Image (cartoon, rainbow, N blue to C red):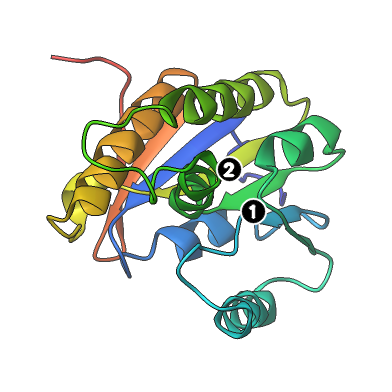
Amino acid sequence: MSAGAAPLAHRTLILGGARSGKSRHAQRLLSEVPAVLYVAPGPVPDGTDVEWDARVAAHRRDRPAGWTTLETTDVAAALQAADRPVLVDCLATWLAATMGGAGAWESVEGDTAWLPRLDDEVDRLLGAWRSARVPVVAVSNEVGSGVVPGTRSGVLFRDALGRLNTRVADLTDDVRLVVAGRVIRLDGERA
């Protein structure tokens, strides 16, 4: 980082709606760090490999040349092994894939057999977030700032993402909300 630049918090969570500028803000936070591990959690369960590859390629073009991209659904392992600052973009994508792996999308109304598998993976991610030896910046969708379908799957996802964001924020030094490209720093106090 250049002289006079604010030091990077050990844990930063950046929340925002779709196309809010949250990912761009995260990249700016780390823009002066010469070596960053960019973790792209996916692919999303409803996308094709071609769509995922195009998304990752577009993001790769926007990042500094010294950054390394890791495409994985095992974000916890990436955080545990990281030897340089990490940018995770995006926790909502990770959650969608993890819920799919736990069986949430195939479950029927009232079936909660998939919840313990999801809870185990969330706990594993939070343990890695808490113990990472390097600064970590994570991007996530703020569920109140986006359109989530009123379908059963949409409600399951919205509720799970709200819980995940809250739990990550509780373990985070610096929480920011991005709305229309404007950044608002959130303090840790709750009303």
Q: Disc 1 versus disc 2: distance between alpha carbons?
A: 8 Å
Seen in the picture, residue 73 relative to 123 is either above or below; the reply is below
The amino acid sitting under disc 1 is Leu
The answer to whether the residues at label 1 and label 2 have Cβ atoms under 8 Å apart is: yes
Indicate the position of residue 141 as horizontal and vertical percent values. 35, 51
160 displayed left or right of 91: left
Is label 2 in a helix, a strand or a loop?
strand
The quadrant in which the C terminus is found is top left
Seen in the picture, residue 55 relative to 101 is either above or below; the reply is below
Indicate the position of residue 23 as horizontal and vertical percent values. 48, 61
Quarter location, residue 121: top right
Q: Which residue is mark 2?
A: 137
* Residue depicted at 40% across the width and 43% down the height: 104
Q: Residues within 10 Å of mark 2 (few under 14, many from 20)?
A: many
75 displayed left or right of 99: right
* Residue depicted at 46% across the width and 38% down the height: 13
Which mark identifies residue 180?
none
